[in-house]
Amino acid sequence: MENSISKILVESVVKKTLKAMKENPDRGIRNLVDMALQFSDGRFQKDFFAAAQTMLQNENSAYYRLVRDVVTYADADRLCTFGMNLGYNGCTVGAQRIRENEKKLGCNIPWTVPIRINTDDFANKETKYQAAISAGERLGIYSCLLFCGSQPQCALPLVKVHPDSAFFLFCEPEGVTSEFLDEAAETYNLMIVIRYDDDYDGELCSRLRDLGLLYSVWIPFGQKDSESIVSGDLFYSAQQLSPVFTVLLPEHDCPDDIRQLVYQTVRQARNEQRYHTVLWDLPGDNNAVDHIISDDICCVLFDADGTLCNWSGPIKNGDYNLFRDDLKNILVSAYPKKIPTYTI
């Protein structure tokens, strides 16, 4: 992405604000949100920052504690790079490009693309993954969710080749080795997202903090977990690790009514600012952002074999595969814009 005058100015202000936040985080985050709202020119940006501004009027908001924590431990340049990639490239310039390309191509385009990496055959598939991310950037997609299991090091070449995108790397705790962390510390456009369960002791998060790395946790859930989610017990436990995001992802066999219940619970808790971590229901909230950016929801997920899926399973209306076709062609074929019908 070209460094326009607008981007250079915004980045300069963000860097200065982040530096000031080290001394006064509460005032700094309010100033940052106020500035972002002032310069926002799209519906998504205006709605998002107006909501954030309203939330921060609550002096007892748990999000103030989150901000204080993050600006204390995280490397400032890393915060700036990741924030600019996600906020400016992804949700400002990228969102506009998505809308333009949707009109041009006549199809829906997602704001983010989750991909389950085939770690056992990554060497043979790397060029396909690189091509998919590049195609996404041309369409306006500058955020990418990569699921790597216990081999997150496979994804680092993808992160390094695409410095304008923000990557969320979902992984198992045992895969976050010292060797991986040494290499990950060299990338500034990455957030590590670690699977959390009751047995996790938090030592790994402490190591990430010591290195100044951004991190979150993700939690798979099914019907058996609904009670601890609705009661808030699960969130109280997870926030002890001070993750930026606590991401919830339904298991394949999770019933629809439980998915809806969890999404409603997450939205309510987030609006009430109960926890010093940002709760994120992956399918529900991703769809909500997508709807705001381009009206129509476009739910995209590529499985480890390259198959196009949604969060419930493979797409049934065609044979779409990331390893056999270009991302743009897949979206044009699988997600055509609906032609409005008029009645007289």
Image (cartoon, helix red, strand yellow):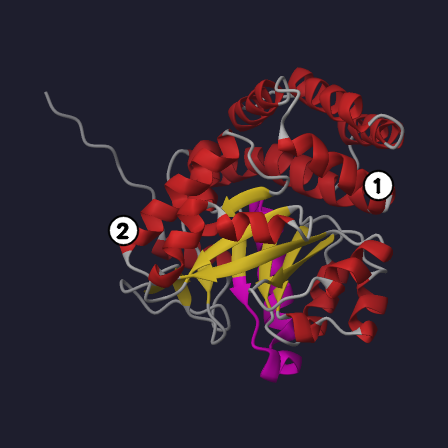
- Percent across and percent down for residue 87 are 66, 36
Q: Please identify the quadrant where the N terminus is shown.
A: top right
- Percent across and percent down for residue 223 are 33, 60
Q: CA distance from mark 2 to mark 1?
A: 40 Å
- Circle 1 residues within 10 Å: few <14, some 14–19, many ≥20: some
The secondary structure that dominates the magenta segment is: helix
- Name the foreground residue: 143 vs 177: 177
Q: Residue at x 72, y 40 (%)?
A: 83
- Percent across and percent down for residue 52 are 60, 25
Q: Amino acid at mark 2?
A: Asp
Q: Is residue 174 above or below residue 31?
A: below
Q: In the structure shown, which secondary structural element does the residue marked by tag 2 occupy?
A: helix
Q: Please identify the quadrant where the C terminus is shown.
A: top left
Q: Earlier in the sequence, mark 2 or mark 1?
A: 1
Does 273 appear in magenta?
Answer: no
- Name the foreground residue: 209 vs 140: 209
Q: Which residues are magenta?
A: 115-143
- Name the foreground residue: 294 vs 247: 247
State how many labels appear: 2
Disc 1 marks which residue? Answer: 72
Q: Is residue 322 above or below residue 190?
A: below
| Drawn side of residue 245 relative to residue 288, left or right | right
| Drawn side of residue 107 relative to residue 92, left or right | left
Q: Residue at x 76, y 52 (%)?
A: 163
- Circle 2 residues within 10 Å: few <14, some 14–19, many ≥20: few
Q: Residue at x 17, y 27 (%)?
A: 342
| Drawn side of residue 264 relative to residue 3, left or right | left
Q: Which mark is residue 257?
A: 2
Does 139 appear in magenta?
Answer: yes
Q: Is residue 70 visible?
A: yes
Q: Amino acid at mark 1?
A: Thr
